[in-house]
Amino acid sequence: MPVAVITGGSRGFGRALAIDLSKDGWHLIIDGRDGAALAEVGELLNSVGGHSTVIAGDVSSARHRTALVRAARRSGSLDLLVNNASTLGPTPLPRLEHLPLPELRQVYEVNVVAPLALIQESLPLLRRSRGTVVSLSSDAAVEGYEGWGGYGSSKAALDQLHQVLAAEEPDLSVYQFDPGDMRTAMHQAAFPGEDISDRPEPESVVAPFRALLASGAPNGRFRADAWAVRP
């Protein structure tokens, strides 16, 4: 039974991916800050025939990260690590001249430091399984959008860490995955008061993500639309 750790698995893309993998018999270790929402997802995963371990907490906590890795170790392996949890920072999104530095540091703590720390702690298991590391990126990492300096620069930093990780760990598969705009709570927070009903649901991005996983593609940064199933 393959084992995956998915951070931010209680809602949005993380939830959609966990449900899809669970249907194929994966053991999922998922986390989230909302304990009630996380427990509900755990029950759903088990109802569709999967096996799940849910651990409520914040990925920026070292103790919480250790709990995730311990759960994977108890499961016997770690085949896939998905760094999906992230924070947008202050909203409405401020221009750089008004971006509070304490909040910028927190964005980096969650979006850059925590994923790297989780990778570091997971490496012994990942090396043993010749596993896969995927972190969620964003077009804001490569484009200059007004107001997106904090979040976008954190994702750019995370992308660079993955490029270096791929060079240092040639036996692992290391991807940065840009899902594009999705109809999520985070995206709504970025555009308060706007109608985002035209954005695709997170479930629509799962198939491209899994196509990338199954492709054996060389390490790198990929957009979801490059892996969309064509009619």
Image (cartoon, helix red, strand yellow):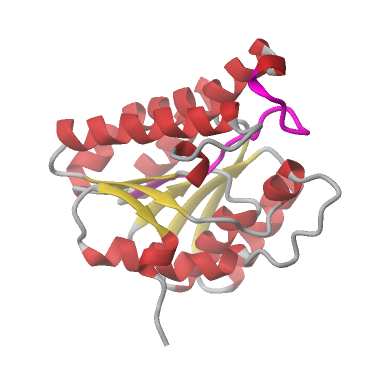
Q: Main secondary structure of the magenta part?
A: loop
Residue drawn at (67%, 29%), measured in percent from left and top?
A: 89
Is residue 113 visible in this depiction of the protein? Answer: yes
Q: Is residue 7 above or below residue 116?
A: below
Q: In this view, does 197 lie to the left or right of 156?
A: right
Residue drawn at (55%, 70%), measured in percent from left and top?
A: 204
Q: Percent from the top left, x then y, of residue 126? A: 26, 41
Query: Which residue occupies the extreme bottom position in the image?
Result: 231
Q: Quadrant of the C terminus?
A: bottom left
Where, by quadrant of the figure, is residue 200 drawn? bottom right
Q: Percent from the top left, x then y, of residue 137? A: 46, 44
Q: In this view, does 184 lie to the left or right of 115?
A: right
> Along the line of sight, which residue is nearer the eye, 212 or 91?
91
Q: Percent from the top left, x then y, of residue 184? A: 68, 54
Question: Is residue 189 part of the magenta span, yes or no?
Answer: no
> Along the line of sight, which residue is nearer the eye, 119 or 221?
221
Question: Is residue 83 part of the magenta span, yes or no?
Answer: yes
Q: Give the range drawn in magenta.
A: 80-96
Q: Is residue 68 above or below residue 217?
A: above
Q: In which quarter of the image is the N terminus?
A: bottom left
